[in-house]
């Protein structure tokens, strides 16, 4: 339960302060001169590229077809704001994968895939860390060892990804229906198997503890960036 509460707190930081940070950076870049604008685009480019690539990868994996992929190209929108990147895709012809559940998975893909890619890149670029180690060992290795070019490159990508991983508002349009369908499926499963006893409940919690802890550690760096950046941006 503590891990789930931590994940919920991290998501609040990302969605509230992370959104403020990204919108503030983009808004300042649009109003600023060319040097500052290009510096902001350079900072955001890796994270936005990973964001859009995660949409495209999950859409393709679920059997959909990507018809337009723009990893990073800031452009003003008609209603105001800036479009940083774009993915257009046709859903899978398979009913479940092409329905609300599949579309919600594509929409929320950056929230998990982007930190996962950053973690894998850190295991490759930061000495002393290997795939399978817990994510918190990455910053620990940076403190314990001299920082080289690979580690600096990873830090830059990690910072950019922390700002650019948040799914946009349109990415959440299928989430309510997806959650409703999953809830109905869970209730149907419980009715079919005759409920769930205490032993099964403890086993489910135990089995979920390790991946939940791993996810909490993956989301910790972007949540921290969102909290610090979002609060500093208010001043």
Image (cartoon, rainbow, N blue to C red):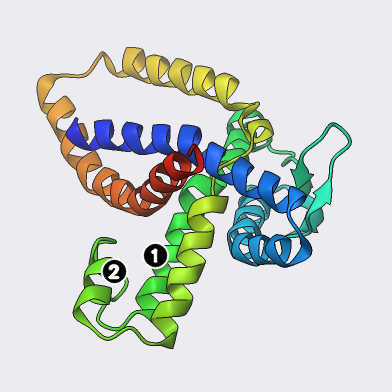
Above or below, comparing residue 101 to residue 33 in the picture: above
Residue at the spot x=44%, y=56% of the render? 115
Q: Is residue 164 left or right of residue 28?
A: left
198 shown above or below 205: above
Secondary structure state at the residue bearing disc 1 = helix
Res. 84 in view: no
Mark drawn on residue 32: none
Q: In which quarter of the image is residue 177?
A: top right
Please name the residue that numbered disc 1 is placed on: 119
Residue closest to the eye, 91 or 15: 15
Foreground pick, 125 / 109? 125
Q: Residue furthest left?
A: 199
SS at mark 2 in the image: helix
Q: Nearer the viewer, mark 2 or mark 1?
A: 2
Q: Residue at 43% of width from left, 70% of height from top?
A: 155
Percent position of residue 51, x then y: 61, 54
The residue lying at 73 percent from left, 60 percent from top is 72
Above or below residue 94? Residue 44 is: below
172 vs 221, left or right, is right
x and y, in percent, of residue 117 in the image: 47, 63
How far apart are labels 2 and 1 at the CA level? 8 Å
Q: Which mark is residue 138?
A: 2
Residue at (28%, 75%) from the top-left corner? Answer: 142
Please state if 119 lies on the left or on the right of 199 as rendered. Answer: right
């Amino acid at each position: 339960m503590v891990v789930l509460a931590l994940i919920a707190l991290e998501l609040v930081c990302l969605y509230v302060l992370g959104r403020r940070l990204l919108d503030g950076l983009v808004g300042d870049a649009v109003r600023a001169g060319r040097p500052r604008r290009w510096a902001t685009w350079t900072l955001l480019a890796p994270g936005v590229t990973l964001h859009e690539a995660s949409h495209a990868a999950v859409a393709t994996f679920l059997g959909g077809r990507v018809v337009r992929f723009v990893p990073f190209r800031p452009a003003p929108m008609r209603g105001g704001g800036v479009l940083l990147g774009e993915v257009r895709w046709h859903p899978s012809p398979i009913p479940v994968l092409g329905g609300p559940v599949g579309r919600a998975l594509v929409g929320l893909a950056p929230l998990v895939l982007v930190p996962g890619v950053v973690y894998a890149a850190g295991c490759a670029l930061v000495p002393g860390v290997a795939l399978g180690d817990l994510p918190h060992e990455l910053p620990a290795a940076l403190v314990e060892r001299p920082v080289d070019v690979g580690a600096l490159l990873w830090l830059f990508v990690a910072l950019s990804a922390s700002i650019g991983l948040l799914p946009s508002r349109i990415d959440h349009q299928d989430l309510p229906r997806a959650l409703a369908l999953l809830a109905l499926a869970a209730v149907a499963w419980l009715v079919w198997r005759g409920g769930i006893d205490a032993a099964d409940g403890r086993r489910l919690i135990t089995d979920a503890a390790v991946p939940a802890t791993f996810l909490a550690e993956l989301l910790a760096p972007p949540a921290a960036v969102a909290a610090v950046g979002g609060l500093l941006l208010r001043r």
